[in-house]
Image (cartoon, rainbow, N blue to C red):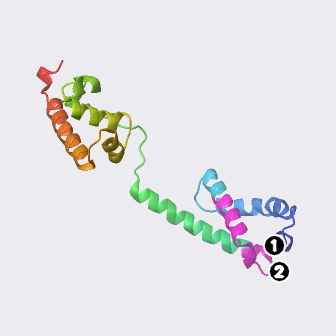
Amino acid sequence: MERYQQADPAAPGALVRALTPTLLRFFRNQPASRAHADDLVQETWMRIHRVRHTYRPGEPVLPWVYAIARRVRIDGYRRKRRIESYETAVDVLPDCPERPDCHHPLPQFDALVVALPESQREVVTMLKVRGLSLEEVARATSSTVGAVKQKAHRAYQRLRKLLEVSPESAP
């Protein structure tokens, strides 16, 4: 561990090879799957790397490593409990219910925009198709940002009315 603190390139590998089996046994003594134990070992090594400066040279390494591993195990348990409290595991995902209003296809954008006046069609196309900002559309149409907002708002209202077509009258 002292060599690891002094940035010896061979030290981390030797430390990992020497202590990983011990850490795996430590984490497998709790009711956890092998994959979860492997995750906890990996998290322990990441923490050891972050806090390696706290190790006091000359003192035993194993108690220091076990203290870190114990905290990782507690944090892992808390994380698992927090996730379990918000999520519910299911074996089979339920089928999504069909929405009754999805039986008819919506008209294409081009077909809807044709019903708009030219100025509104131009503004909506620039905003939604070309992705221009309000300022860019105002400059392109030689108008103010307020006028562009007003044309867009009126166009959206008209498009909403066109989309509120009942299913019977849909094409």
Q: Which mark is residue 71?
A: none
- Where does residue 12 sit, x and y in percent of width and height? 81, 63
SS under mark 1: helix
Q: Quadrant of the N terminus?
A: bottom right
Nearer to us in this view, 25 or 84:
84
- The answer to whether residue 106 of the structure is visible from this angle is yes
- Where does residue 98 sit, x and y in percent of width and height? 26, 31
**Mark 2 and 1 residues: CB-CB less than 8 Å, in contact?**
yes
Label 1 packing within 10 angstroms: few (<14), some (14-19), many (20+):
some
The residue shown at (50%, 66%) is 78
Which residue carries the number 1 mark? 5
Stretch of the chain drawn in magenta: 40-64
Magenta stretch, main secondary structure, is helix
Q: 70 above or below 84?
A: below
Three-letter code for the amino acid on which mark 1 is drawn: Gln
Q: Is residue 60 left or right of residue 144?
A: right
Q: How many marks?
A: 2
User: Would you identify the image quadrant in which residue 93 lies?
Assistant: top left
Q: Which mark is residue 57?
A: 2
Q: Is residue 88 left or right of residue 152?
A: right
